[in-house]
Image (spheres, rainbow, N blue to C red):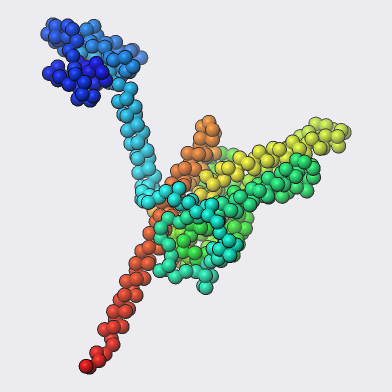
Amino acid sequence: MFCQHCGTASSPDQKFCKHCGATIVAPEGAQQVQSAAPPSAPQTLPPGAIPVPPAGAYPPPSGTSFAAMPGVVYQGAAQAFHYVSPQAAAVAHSIQQTKLLHSLTDRIQSLASTESLEGFSLLQMFSEVFKRRGSEAVEDYILVGTDRSTPPIELIETGWPKPWLFFRLLAALIIAYVGLTVLFMQTGNTNCVPGMMFLGAFAVPLATLTLFFEFNTPRNVSLHVVGKLFLFGAVASLAVALLGYSLPIFDYATMEAGIVEEVAKLLTVVVVMRSIRYKYILNGVLFGATVGAGFAAFETAGYALNEGLLPGLLAPILQAGSAAQAVYGPAMHQGVVAMLQILRLRGILTPLGHVAWTALSAGAFWRVKMGRPTSITMLFDHRFLKAFIIPVALHAIWDAPIQLPFLGNQIITGLITWYVVFGLVQQGLRQVKEEQRLKLESTLATVQASLQAQPVLSA
């Protein structure tokens, strides 16, 4: 029988509900029903059939839901079933979702060879974004990477970084972009169009790259190196990708883009950044983000031109024939509007795509490289290959022909990518911390050896 207050199943000898504590009152005629007929064996209903409570079964309290689940067998029932309260059903559903999420994260961690994030908080990470700083503080912050400006290993922060410069750069570029857009809309001056395209395509990739620059807590990579890799890496990775698309086995408009483009960007990072000077995992994450940012910026500019500006300009002109001059003004406006729509959409999605994907794959490669000279065999290391599958697969899902509503494919793949990226950042921080420990032990051993070597002075 069941509690009249919450609907929890109870045995006949119970006087109080074990769930809510209410007094249980046996329904009238329940004993007669129990003694009249023995329990029937549960039966399987035909597919699609809805189980019906047997005659004499105690009805569920108002507001509860019925679930056909193995449970209490009523006397005379044709099959086993019981009632579940909405509260219990909600708790069970929440537990099931939590188990599913934990199972997914465990699989991702196993594939990427990372651990659960410890001490991680987005609020704490970005807590210094709006802190006031002078121009001198900004200059000191970005002047790193040289022999004089790289901090010693003992002074490197090993806690989660607190970036802030990326937001200032993003705000400045967006303000400039909006200013040029308003100026064009008010004046119609076509001189504003190239600047709008440039700022719209480069604003978010550069800001995201700056975020990864701040993640590089060893501070051993200069802006000069980042700038060269950004430009050269963008051109080189695009060239390799176009070469890959020229092969008959690959198609630019399919999910195969995940293979071609991720391989092209990674090879660019591996070939260009061969120096053993950059031995940290965080260095590899930064180099990957740099090439990915350049690739994303150039690709967005190409999309804005080929799918936005040019069709908007040419289609009305071609349709107009001899009256092309009369429609040139509206055609320009239509083309710019289409271009701006592409720039805004790709700008919003940029942090979830190329920049983070290449940061993930390069960070996984640097985890294998570990300051050694680059070797082709490192590309076949199982630790790297398992992690490299992640950005390739996520890129393919991003471009899949079946798309979830509200940019579902992009948001889900982006969240997974950043989860793995933060796992690599955590491993990079632990690598620095381990080097600090080894440095300290070496210093202590040197001091102890020096003290033992000194002659003992007589009294």
Where is residue 101, by image quadrant?
top left
126 or 327: nearer the eye?
A: 126
Q: How many marks?
A: 0
Q: Describe residue 221's horizontal placement relative to residue 110 as left or right.
A: right
Q: Which x, y percent locates residue 225? A: 57, 64
Question: What residue do we see at 40% from left, 55% from top?
Answer: 426
Q: Describe residue 272's horizontal placement relative to residue 455 as left or right.
A: right
- Work out whether 199 lies above or below 336: below
- Is residue 182 in view from this perspective? yes
Q: Which x, y percent locates residue 144? A: 53, 66
- Work out whether 341 lies above or below 39: below
Question: What residue do we see at 83% from left, 34% from top?
Answer: 327
229 or 178: nearer the eye?
A: 178
Question: What residue do we see at 26% from left, 20% from top?
Answer: 6
Considering the image in quadrants, where does the N terminus appear?
Answer: top left
Q: Describe residue 179's horizontal placement relative to residue 454 as left or right.
A: right
- Is residue 295 in view from this perspective? no
Question: What residue do we see at 86% from left, 37% from top?
Answer: 325
- Work out whether 355 lies above or below 323: below
Q: Which x, y percent locates residue 204? A: 59, 49
Residue that sits furthest to the bottom in the current view: 458
Residue that sits furthest to the front in the current view: 132
- Work out whether 25 lies above or below 108: above
Q: Which x, y percent locates residue 165? A: 55, 56
Considering the image in quadrants, where does the C terminus appear?
Answer: bottom left
383 or 99: nearer the eye?
A: 99
Q: Describe residue 318's horizontal placement relative to residue 258 as left or right.
A: right
